[in-house]
Each structure stands twice: as C-alpha cells, then as structure tokens.
Amino acid sequence: MLPTRFPTRGADDAGPEPLLPGASRAVLSEFVATAVFVFAAEGSVYGLWKMFTDTGTPGGLLVVAVAHALALAAAVSLAIDASGGHVNPAVTFGLLVGRRISFARAVLYWAAQLLGAVLAAALLRLVSGGVRPMGFALGHGIHERHALLLEVVMTFGLMYTVYATAVDRSRGGNGNVSAIAPIAIGFVLGANILAGGPFDGAAMNPARAFGPALVGWSWRHHWVYWVGPLIGAGLAGALYESVVAEQPEPPAAAATPTRLPLPAEDY
C-alpha cells in the first residue's frame, strides 16, 4: 500500500548485499505480514472464545476491533520497506486499478497474502488443539446483499485512507513514507469493525476471510468477502487517482501529456 523503490547499491556503499532480489523480498514480506496480521486478528477471536461462553458482547466487539487495528498497523509497518505493506488482496487490487503496481507483481502479492492467511489459520488450529477457526458469518436478519454493500462501503473507506495517508503523500518530495499511515490504516479498520462487525464480521480483506474458511472448511456466504472488498477498493483507487490525486506537471515541450505513467519499477 505504500510506494517504495529499491535504488541500485553503489560499489562504495556500506553494508551487505541483500540475499534476495527486490521482487522476492517483497513477496516474502507480504506473506509474513499477512500471516502476522491474520494470526493476531483471528487469534483475538480464539482468545475471547476461550475465556467467555458468549463472545457477542460490546466488550468482545471492542477487544476484537482493537486487536485488528493494532495487528494491521504492525503488519503494515513491518512490510513497508520491502513491499509497501499491502497485507490485503483488495488493497493490492485498488493499487492495480490506480496503476500503482503491475499486474504480474499483483498476482504474486495475492498468492503470498492468501498463503500467509492459510498458514496463520492452520497454526491457530494447531495451537488450540484442533479448534476450527471462527471465520466470518452474517448476523441475524442480514441478507447477502446487505453484507455485500457493507463490505463495499467499509473497504472503500479503508482503501481511500491508504491513498490519502500513504500513497498520495509519497508522490511528491523525496518519496518517504508518512509515519502516520500505518496507524491511520489500522484505526479505520478497527472503527469499521465496530460499525460492521455485528452485521457481517467486517472482513474488508479477502485473505482475512479465506484463511479461516479454508482451514475450517466453511464457505457459506464466502463470496461476499471477496466481491465486496474488491469492488470497494477498486472504486476508491479509481476515484482517488482520477479526481483527488495531484496531477503531474506536463513537460513544456510535450504536445499531448500522459497522465500517471507507469513507473520504471513496480510499487
């Protein structure tokens, strides 16, 4: 979610050469960051279930929201330097729509994110003695169309926050990542869980839903947690890039300036 570049290391630069090329390090970072996020996020639900019989309380909702917010902020921060810290297939899709990442790299990120989520869910099942992941489910009286719209709206807000605090701020100047971005992104996730959690669980992340669904083999309404976030993130990326993002100054001699050319290196 945060643009990053890997300049060529000079012969006189201090420090060892990286063991992996930039693309491999980025994919590995997405895998690890997503595993860290899903383990802590889904693990907070496990912890509540272990301590209390009834987890559907206001206090339980608050605990889960705070755990998700902290886990996402940490996961984004740990992957910033290598991959930009997407930690979410929907965020990767939103940046693909905004032409901030190539399709080939997006596919690699998606694979890493899904595998990381599956690993986290499998580890939780292992350490809990075989308890299936809780996953996501629709609240009482909530239809799939309601949950779909809710996921679109919540993920739109998440993706828009990513653009406003991380992507757009790094376009100008020296390209440094905004220090507040991981915190803001975590906060909006937690706030959306407080708002949407009682209705459909508030996934906003296909990987977050996919890992527990696969390990627990529970696919009811699962498509909602893919279609909704992808639509919401795509709309946010398209809107921000076409309306809000500052347009580059066209070259003086150019007859037909091109808007937002693809960078030489993927974000």
Image: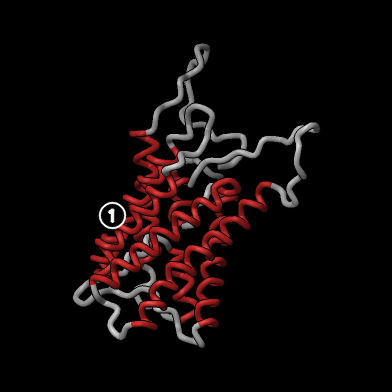
Residue 73 % position (x, y): 44, 54
Residue for point 77% across, 44% down: 16
Q: Quadrant of residue 30?
A: bottom right
Residue for point 26% across, 71% down: 59
Residue 113 % position (x, y): 53, 61
* Rendered position, 134 above or below 253: below
Q: Secondary structure at mark 1?
A: helix
Q: Is residue 81 left or right of residue 224?
A: right
Residue farthest along the front direction in this orientation: 51
Q: Quadrant of the C terminus?
A: top right
Residue farthest along the right direction in this orientation: 11
Residue for point 45% across, 25% down: 248
* Rendered position, 258 above or below 16: above
Residue for point 36% across, 82% down: 51
Q: Is residue 267 left or right of residue 10?
A: left
Instruction: Identify residue type, mark 1.
Output: Val
Q: Residues within 10 Å of mark 1 (few under 14, many from 20)?
A: many
- The residue at which mark 1 appears reads as 153
Residue farthest along the top direction in this orientation: 253
